[in-house]
């Protein structure tokens, strides 16, 4: 772990990858029950379990005052009508924010809070999305190339995947005749609000 100030490139994909401490690959099989079309999910799984997204992390100690940062790369594609997307999560330490800066591609950040509110913010190159504390967030690629975003958040925030695993997001983003369209998630259990 570096103890002096440091920099790393994020605009040239070739140069940047060796600058990170950690690389995560999420394949379709790790996104079980996330997509609405189970038949399309199984078909794609059998055809080779593609990588849906990757994360490159610049790790820091999980201590207050430190910032974790890195790149999220969501590949283009769909499961049925639903665009490739990240799992999505709340931060374990709820009162922690996050900033996303889009470098390449096209998509949205789908967000919701535990009071029942939803927010959708566009991602395209040069655009920043500020995720306020207490909002779950998921990146969704609606374009034809990789959606690449730079993220930074308090290193002690942690990831709470269990809450979203249990209920799903309230909304989904589907392709309707080439138009990304927000719809209700009918599979979300009634009692989860
Ligand atoms: O901390 C973040 O919000 C990002 O680094 C995400 O972890 C990244 O985009 C991958 O998404 P997820 O953690 O929901 O799988
Ligand atoms: Ni986060």
Image (spheres, grey):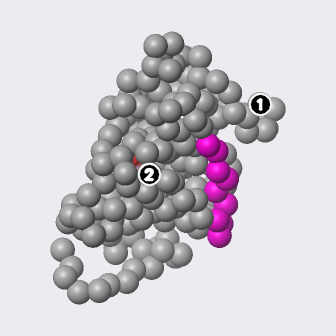
Between 36 and 89, the one nearer to me in the picture: 89
Measured from the top left, where is residue 59 in percent x and y?
A: 27, 66
Instruction: Give the vertical position of 56 relative to 36 (above or below).
Output: below
In magenta, the rendered stretch is: 119-127
Q: Is residue 2 visible?
A: yes
Tell which tag, 1 or 2, sits nearer the viewer. 2
| Residue drawn at x 34%, y 75% as measured from the top left | 19
Q: Would you say residue 12 sits in the magenta stretch?
A: no
The residue at label 1 has a CB less than 8 Å from ligand 1 = no
Query: Residue 133 vs residue 147: left or right?
Result: left
Residue 126 among those drawn in magenta = yes
Residue 171, above or below 57 = above
Q: Earlier in the sequence, mark 1 or mark 2?
A: 2
Q: Residues within 10 Å of mark 1 (few under 14, many from 20)?
A: few
Residue 90: % across, % down: 39, 42
75 lies above or below 128? above
Residue where numbered disc 2 is placed: 133
Distance from the alpha carbon under mark 1 to that under mark 2: 32 Å
Looking at the picture, how far across and down is residue 52, in whole percent? 48, 43
Q: Total marks drawn?
A: 2
Rendered image: mark on residue 176 = 1
125 to the left or right of 139: right
Question: Residue visible at 38% across and 24% down?
Answer: 166
Residue 38 seen in this snapshot: no
SS of the residue at dot 1?
strand
Q: Residue at x 53, y 16 (%)?
A: 187
Disc 2 CB within 8 Å of nearest ligand 2 atom: no
Q: Is residue 191 left or right of residue 62?
A: right
């Amino acid at each position: 772990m570096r103890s002096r100030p440091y920099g790393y490139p994020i605009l040239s994909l070739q140069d940047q990858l060796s600058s990170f401490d950690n690389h995560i690959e999420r394949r379709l099989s790790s996104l079980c029950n996330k997509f609405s079309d189970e038949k399309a999910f199984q078909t794609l799984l059998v055809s080779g379990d593609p990588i849906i997204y990757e994360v490159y992390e610049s790790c820091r100690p999980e201590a207050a005052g430190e910032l974790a940062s890195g790149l999220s790369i969501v590949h283009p594609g769909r499961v049925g009508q639903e665009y490739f997307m990240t799992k999505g999560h709340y931060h374990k330490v709820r009162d922690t924010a996050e900033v996303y800066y889009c470098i390449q591609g096209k998509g949205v950040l789908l967000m919701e809070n535990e009071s029942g509110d939803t927010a959708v913010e566009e991602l395209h190159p040069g655009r920043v999305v500020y995720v306020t504390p207490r909002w779950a967030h998921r990146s969704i690629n609606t374009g034809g190339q990789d959606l690449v975003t730079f993220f930074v958040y308090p290193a002690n925030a942690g990831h709470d995947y269990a809450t979203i695993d249990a209920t799903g997001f309230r909304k989904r983003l589907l392709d309707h005749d080439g138009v990304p369209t927000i719809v209700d998630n009918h599979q979300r259990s009634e009692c989860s609000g």
